[in-house]
Image: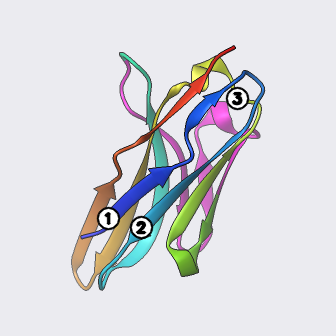
Amino acid sequence: QVEVVESGGGLVQPGGSLRLSCAASVSSFSITAMAWYRQAPGKQREFVARITSGGFTNYLDSVKGRFTISRDNAKNTAYLQMLRLEPEDTAVYYCKVSAVRGFTRSDDWGQGTQVTVSS
């Protein structure tokens, strides 16, 4: 099992920036991908960005050009740099870590970190 901890959320004005971190504690697992999702009040959780162990990335269309996902494999940590934030980006942001150990696959989630974009 993988323990996942997010950090870096907060209150920011429209047009501002934040960087989220996702730290994974692994035991005999190899991480294959790390991803960010978000859930706004009254809405379903949605995919935001993903990065594989090989460095391939993909993004939600509405965040392309504003958000960048990156990863430090040595630290088992992923980052989400968010620029030009908009009120519509307000949500709880969750990190999902996908890992394998032999024939066992796992997907583990963190508790989430709140991002509020408001003036």
The residue located at (56%, 25%) in the rendering is: 116
Mark 3 and mark 1 residues within 8 Å of each other at the beta carbon: no
**Closer to the camera in the image, 11 or 22:** 11
Q: Where is mark 2, residue-wise?
A: 24
Task: Give the extent of the magenta segment.
Answer: 43-69
Residue nearest the observer in this picture, 32 or 13: 13
Which residue is painted at 60% across and 51% down in the image?
A: 58
Mark with earlier residue (1, 2): 1
Badge 1, how many Cα within 10 Å: few under 14, some, many 20+?
few
Label pair 1/2, CB-CB below 8 angstroms = yes
Question: Which secondary structure lies at badge 2?
Answer: strand
Residue at image location 49% in from the left, 48% down from the top: 36
Give the quadrant of residue 102: bottom left
- Sequence order check, earlier mark of 2 and 3: 2
Residue under circle 1?
3
Estimate the spatial distance between the alpha carbons at disc 2 and disc 3, rounded to whole Å.
26 Å
